[in-house]
Amino acid sequence: MNDLQLMHEVVKLALMAGEAILPFWRADVAVTNKADDSPVTAADLAAHRVIADGLLALAPHIPVLSEEDCNIPLAERQGWSRWWLVDPLDGTKEFIAGSEEFTVNIALVENSEVVFGVVSMPTNGRCYFGGRGLGAWRAEAGEVAQPIQVRNAPAQGERFTVVASRRHSSPEQEALLAGLGAAVGELELANIGSSLKFCLLAEGSADCYPRLAPTSQWDTAAAQGVVEGAGGEVIGLDGLPFRYPARDSLLNPYFLALPANAKWRQAFLKLI
């Protein structure tokens, strides 16, 4: 099975995981806190089981690193060349609040780089998927998937749109937005939860997603695959491609997601 075929099988699996989540949505599910004080529910664990079992059946030789099963020693992870990076329920806080803005994230990583990613929305069956060199698509429930692409500039008369988190910002990020506004004009801010922030960029509904606040590897890898398949890029503040090396901490450094060929790219990087 090649990577494109494997990606389509993972799309089916992500939708199945979403079906496992839905019975718990808006059902007063019990919430417990993990060691890092992040919330977890029975929905997270149900989706994890579906994904872990499904990936094992699809590719028994590829190990899985999931938010709900991440206590794997560094010495073991350093020996992996190809692995799955999974967030069974990204946006647990949105899920608990009754919002629709939570996703299932599944990425295939090889030598620290994303091969492809799948991001599905359990509440409506929408799914984004893609990878560098493979393309990117958005599929609505029951419909044929449509290709998506980043936009290199807003349409005439539209504002430059920056994706921001509903819950997370930082003084550094606010300063960056102020500098970006001075460079490109008045900004429109699009606030949305979970990895859907990347997907707005990938489908051409937004221009940039800077993240100068904490994230974990499983929060970003799947949606990075979608962005890269759609002609975008995710880079660190050093301007280098954003990767997922094995290291003690599973927290990400800060990053920027943007169209790879945007005319304003160099001016933006000078703000960093």
Image (cartoon, helix red, strand yellow):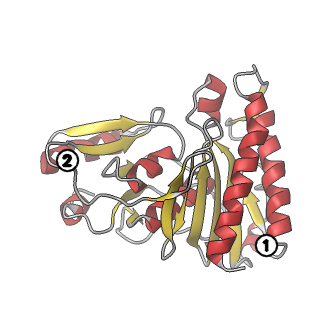
Q: Residue at x 73, y 33 (%)?
A: 22
Percent across and percent down for residue 65 are: 73, 61
Q: Does 149 sit left or right of 44 as displayed?
A: left
Which residue reaches farthest top? 28
Percent across and percent down for residue 43 are: 77, 36
Q: Amino acid at mark 2?
A: Gly
Q: Nearer the viewer, residue 102 or 209?
A: 102
Q: Nearer the viewer, residue 25 or 15?
A: 15
Badge 1 crowding class, 10 Å Cα cut-off, few under 14, some 14 to 19, many 20 or more, is few
Q: Which residue is mark 1?
A: 76
Percent across and percent down for residue 158 are: 19, 42
Q: Answer whether labels 1 and 2 touch (C-beta < 8 Å).
A: no
Residue 12 visible at all: yes
Q: Residue at x 19, y 64 (%)?
A: 263
Q: Does 229 sit left or right of 265 as displayed?
A: right
Q: Which residue is mark 2?
A: 179
Q: How far is the residue under mark 1 from the one under mark 2?
A: 43 Å
Could you tell me which secondary element the residue under label 1 belongs to?
helix
- Where does the C terminus fall, quadrant-wise? bottom left
Task: State whether residue 136 is above or below residue 215.
Answer: below
Q: Residue at x 48, y 77 (%)?
A: 133
Could you tell me which secondary element the residue under label 2 belongs to?
helix
Q: Amino acid at mark 1?
A: Glu
